[in-house]
Image (cartoon, grey):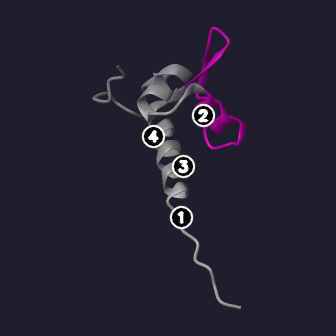
Amino acid sequence: MVDLDVDLHATLWTVAEAAEAAGVTAEVVRAWCYRGRLAAADRRRGRPVFRAIDVIRAEKATRERARRTYSLQAA
């Protein structure tokens, strides 16, 4: 379980920890990176780690985009 009662600006998470905290799979976190929505803050043992606050912001933005609705306009 990921502890959210920490300094979110200083805490670094691995892909697995970021996925658990955001409630998504690791593949989604990797997709955010590929699409430029999440940038690695550093690398540990050659693997990316992310600032906790950046993960939370990426997750929030993704959820907001998913809530968009489009109405049909009469021609």
Marks 4 and 2, the one that precedes in the sequence? 2
Location of the C terminus by quadrant is: bottom right
Labels 2 and 3: the sequence-earlier one: 2
Q: Mark yes or no: residue 14 visible.
A: no
Residue at the left extreme?
5
Amino acid at pointer 1: Arg
Q: Amino acid at mark 4?
A: Ile
Q: Secondary structure at mark 4?
A: helix
Q: Quadrant of the N terminus?
A: top left
Q: Secondary structure at mark 3?
A: helix
Of badges 4 and 2, the one in the foreground is: 2
The stretch drawn in magenta includes residue 33: yes
Q: Which residue is mark 3?
A: 62
Q: Position of residue 65 (x, y in %)?
A: 55, 57
- The stretch of residues the image draws in magenta is 27-49
Q: Position of residue 20 (x, y in %)?
A: 44, 26
Separation of disc 2 and disc 1 at Cα? 19 Å
Q: Earlier in the sequence, mark 4 or mark 1?
A: 4
Instruction: Quickly name the residue at label 4.
Output: 56
Q: Please tell me which of labels 1 and 3 falls first in the chain.
A: 3
Q: CA distance from mark 1 to mark 3?
A: 11 Å
Which residue in the structure is indicated by mark 2? 28
Marker disc for residue 68: 1
Residue toward you, 2 or 43: 2
Q: Amino acid at mark 2?
A: Val
